[in-house]
Amino acid sequence: MSILALGVSYRRASVELLERLAFSSDDLAKAYRHLGELDSVREGVILSTCNRVEVYAEVGSYHAGFLELKRFLADSRELDPDEFAEPLYSHYEEHAVEHLLGVAAGLDSMVLGEPQILTQVRQAYRRADAEGAVGATLSAMFRGAIRTGRRVRAETDIGASPAAFVEAGAGMAGEVLSGLARRSAVIVGAGGMAALAAAHLRERGIGRLQIVNRSPDRAERLAARSGAEHGGLDLLTVAVAQADLVVSSTGAVGTVLPAEAVREALSANGRVGRPLFVLDLAVPRDVDPAVADVPGVTLADIDDLRDLLAARGTAPAEEIDRAGAIVAEEAGRFTAWRRAARLAPVIRALRDRGSRIRAAELARMSPRLAGLSDREWEAVEALTEGIVAKLLHHPIVRLKDAQAGDGLAKAVLDLFGLEPDPEG
């Protein structure tokens, strides 16, 4: 069995495509059932975040696995495969391992070293485990990825600010609105990103701040921490009518802020001619893209932040190199474990074969050795054990040699007529 990773990320896909491919928490149970029915897939983990949708799987072969996982994405998200064929990428075997470890380390993120991805990798693994979709191989691989992410954050200085997206978007809003001090803002949502937005806007001297959320209780808790007003989503249109800036980051599936609601808000008394900046930090998007066509409104989403974030200063090259070295070290550690796990049944079968032959020959010769004393019999047993061990020593050493490749293991199985028991 081999490891294959197949996916689409922010590097080549639009936010519109990413949101169409994204799996919500409610989608995953059905998706894992579907994944488990694929002929080529033995284990699987779905990693679906704002910036990527990837499936990691242990498959029978690259070609069959690639075709089945591609069809799995298409069927699960009800898309024509041609719609995501161009940005689709795959990584196989050690390249798949290195890719996942680099993702967990934050080296493949829109914002270098951003910390949220490690939590998302951990959550993806836990969900796959809960669904019974992972076995020994992907469990070890994802545990290694989580360990890699922790090491990179502890041993290097590449970690990005958790508020990087908020800071970049607020900077864009400040340019459009000629500053944010004493402006009025509304935050849609009450999760982690919304909390970061509230804190950052307070630092920038925002004036009136309102928190609206599907759960008014959560909105109230965030409002209490940030000195804001609060309410439910039923107040959204009224809140937008009073705001200069709207920041939306919810986990909702579907549009939270439609274009018609924005038009209605901008037509309110005293609002005409006052610009509005809307920052959509959610994937799938909270804000109807048609909002950008409403006169007086500037809309920015994740796509609009890419170039801005990429152009900002990154960590020193030596820190990136240190992080890369950690990824390489941990990838090597996983490869060594996997090789040992693959070879253990072969080595065990080889040793068992030697022991059986030795025991059979001693049994065959026992009538002729019946006159031996106990001490002499022990000497014969020790001698035969030593002969078998010496004969098998070099083949076993060569099997453990990382440069020998799996072909040598197959040759040993064929030459000695072995049928290893993977369960031991």
Image (spheres, helix red, strand yellow):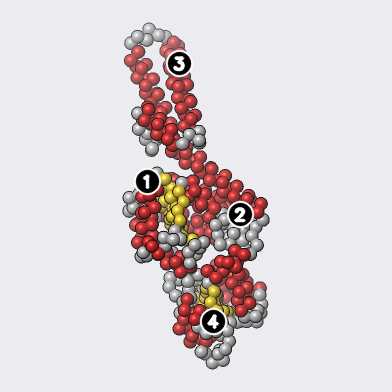
For marks 2 and 1, give the CA distance.
Answer: 35 Å
Q: For the point 50% across and 79% down, which residue is it?
A: 292
User: SS class of the residue under badge 4?
Assistant: strand
Upstream in sequence: badge 1 or badge 4: 1
For marks 2 and 4, give the CA distance.
Answer: 39 Å
* In front of the other: 44 or 221: 44
Rate crowding at label 1 as few (under 14), some (14 to 19) or many (20 or more) other CA atoms within 10 Å.
some
Q: What's the mark number on residue 383? A: 3
Upstream in sequence: badge 3 or badge 2: 2
| Disc 4 target residue | 297
Q: Is residue 222 above or below residue 358?
A: below
Residue found at the very far bottom of the displayed protein: 269
Upstream in sequence: badge 3 or badge 4: 4
For marks 3 and 4, give the CA distance.
Answer: 89 Å
Instruction: Give the residue type that dot 1 points to.
Output: Gly
Upstream in sequence: badge 3 or badge 1: 1
In what quadrant of the picture does the C terminus appear? top left
Rate crowding at label 4 as few (under 14), some (14 to 19) or many (20 or more) other CA atoms within 10 Å.
some
User: SS class of the residue under badge 2?
Assistant: helix
Residue found at the very far top of the displayed protein: 371
For marks 3 and 2, give the CA distance.
Answer: 55 Å
| Disc 2 target residue | 153
| Disc 1 target residue | 60
| Residue 410 seen from this side | yes
Instruction: Give the residue type that dot 3 points to.
Output: Leu
